[in-house]
Amino acid sequence: MKQVTIKDVARAAGVSYSTVSRAMSGSPGISEKTRARIVQLCEEMNYTANAVARSMVMKSTKLLGLIVTDISNPFMSELAYYIDGQARARGYNIVLCNSLRSLEQERGLFELMISRKVDGVILLPAESESYSTLGALLPRIPTVFLGENLKDAPESYVAVDNYRGAYMGVEYLYKLGHRRILYFGKRRGSSTHQLRSDGYHAACEAYGLTPRCLNNTFMSTSIKYGYQLAQQLFAQPMDYTAIFAATDTNALGIIQAAEERGIRIPEDLSLLGFDNIRDGALPRIGLTTVEQPKKLLASMAVDSLLDKIENEQSGYAHRILTPSVVERSTCRAIEE
Amino acid sequence: MKQVTIKDVARAAGVSYSTVSRAMSGSPGISEKTRARIVQLCEEMNYTANAVARSMVMKSTKLLGLIVTDISNPFMSELAYYIDGQARARGYNIVLCNSLRSLEQERGLFELMISRKVDGVILLPAESESYSTLGALLPRIPTVFLGENLKDAPESYVAVDNYRGAYMGVEYLYKLGHRRILYFGKRRGSSTHQLRSDGYHAACEAYGLTPRCLNNTFMSTSIKYGYQLAQQLFAQPMDYTAIFAATDTNALGIIQAAEERGIRIPEDLSLLGFDNIRDGALPRIGLTTVEQPKKLLASMAVDSLLDKIENEQSGYAHRILTPSVVERSTCRAIEE
DNA sequence: TCCGTTCTCTCAAACGTTTCCAATACCATT
DNA sequence: AATGGTATTGGAAACGTTTGAGAGAACGGA
């Protein structure tokens, strides 16, 4: 495991180490003959430049921090997949961390990233509060928030238009004939969920529907939570024809509870999700949902961040993408 | 974004920078009084040591490379989740890459890791050939293979006993009364799949069953592939009562094809998977499967790697865990 | 008062690159 | 043969930290 350094190569080639450096990096001012000779020699000696030393002098690690709440969540792992692809295409690598949805952890990880001198960080925030928790740390490293709408905050973020997505969802159900639509699972402390809920209410108003909302203080986006909440819900008479779930994972929990109660989807109840996680496309599930364009989201986040880094802009940009409804088999047309 | 260095702090504190270093790192040979004063000052000045510079002199980055074929695959993202947890508990971070199941990419990434000077790498290999492709690179950095059985190869790996898992799977089905069990989806070029297939054959022999195997050259572990292959399969008469799928993702594809054909699972056909990916536990799916203990797998991989790194052992270790069957609802008892 | 000891702190080297600037070699032109 | 110009190479500083060796101060005992 002994490290072969540029000096070893220089000595073997009988040149100075600046020459070797030039040969490897493809900079001009070196004859083709020596370059070829040195490159050849490097291969023989198994020399690869030490990226740490390079980072030191270049003041750039070519590393991007990626802080997610939970990489095993399908929405995030899919995002991570695309982020890695885009980052690598542009010469960067990803250092990945899970914040476990804890603001404290998140802050710690953010500091860690600063001290590791990654060139920038992409953050899938634990909560909308993340923005304020991180406060003073933010100016110390280029950052883009991903997924969460930060409204007018002076920080870059890339997110889907959650308000509009929810609006479109209601619209979609309305056109199928639904007039009594229950919104399921508004989560506190998340601007994403606030906006979705707002969009739902706005659409209801626009279409003359009376909104009905299943709020809850300690909402979580897990399948389990959706299941538990749905159990309670189904214990009461069903005075709605469709449920609009705040997230796909919640919707999955609803499916399970419905299954157990003998409520058939979509025959007895239409169900619409939000996110379009991959699991929703699974056989036997076929969840109709509002899609977040994950590949686009990911590559815009990377591009946005690299812009900031490479052009040393200190400004910020808000990029908001338009969602769309993807139809599968959990919603059906009805006549009331 | 201007970097605060140790010199700035030293100047402000009126001490040399070695003193600051010692104060921060908690080394002895410094009075409590000055230490407290300096630590305080560091906070005020927002000083955090530059990890790159530290890596340079310490000859350790406290970074672990994690090369997976596809982080969006639920099996791998779950593994990654646990790996990050364990690594961070021991003071390391993860740099994540997707090899896209290409040996060439994988090799490139491995070289990248070497040049990045990560302290070690955990590799979920693209193929069992990975071991030989990487060949000369392997001695240059501590590595542990995860998931794939490398038999007697002189390299560390952590994997489940795939042979035994498959054997147990057959045993399980046998005890439910199944006598005609089809093995679905043996993949070439993967020792994991070879072993599973071997285990299946051995168990058939032991229980006096005639093995029936759906081999195929260009097998992929995706849902889509399982679906396509199952479509072909179901076009022919069904002369088996259970399918043992090589992976859960394949099983998911089978479910979809069965659904479309009107084949009910488990009433008409029992289905057993392998891996216990999280999706299998979803409502309406409830896949019975052979479980790989992912959390354990992950933490053993990390521990094994760190052992190697921190004790500078050049040896290798093979750790093989025992799988178990997790029962859900895709298999049922029959009488033939 | 002086010396030895202990405690605290400073100095400087080292880690492996990149790059600016200076120096040399080479070539063609006069 | 001398000169000028250009193409190539070498030297050295710089990046920010850790750490071993050594310097200086404080202190107690003789």
Image: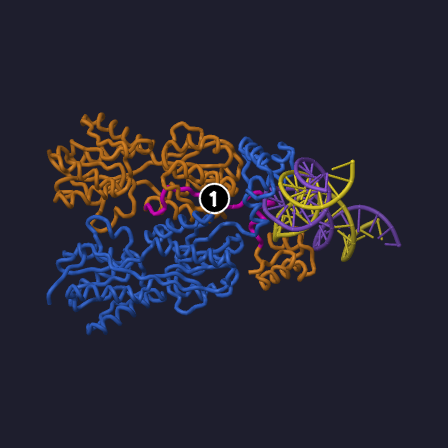
Chain colours: A blue, B orange, C purple, D yellow
Can see residue A3?
no
Per the image, the residue denoted by label 1 is: B64
Q: Is residue A115 above or below residue B288?
A: below
**Taking the image as drawn, is residue B237 in sight?**
yes
**A299 in the magenta segment:** no
Residue B264: image location, x then y, percent: 13, 44
Chain containing the residue with disc 1: B
Label 1 Cα crowd, 10 Å radius (few <14 / some 14-19 / many 20+): many
Along the line of sight, the residue nearer the viewer: A283 or A41: A41
x, y (%) of residue B330?
19, 43
Left or right of residue A309: residue A232: left
Closest to the observer, B167 or B104: B104
The quadrant of the image that shows the N terminus of chain A is top right
Q: Residue at x 52, y 42 (%)?
A: B117
Question: Residue sitting at 62 percent across and 32 percent down?
Answer: A13
Q: Quadrant of residue B257?
A: top left
**Quarter holding the C terminus of chain A?**
bottom left
Q: Secondary structure under badge 1?
A: strand
User: Is A166 in front, or is A247?
Assistant: A166
Q: Position of residue A202 (x, y in %)?
A: 26, 72
Residue B234 lies in quadrant? top left
Q: Where B288 falls versus A174 (above or below)?
A: above
Magenta-span inclusion, residue B55: yes
Q: Which residues are magenta?
A: B49-73
Front residue of A289 and B32: A289
Residue B168 is situated, as x and y percent measured from the top left of the image, at 26, 34
Q: Please report the residue visible at 39 percent of the width from the left and 57 percent of the height from the top.
A: A300
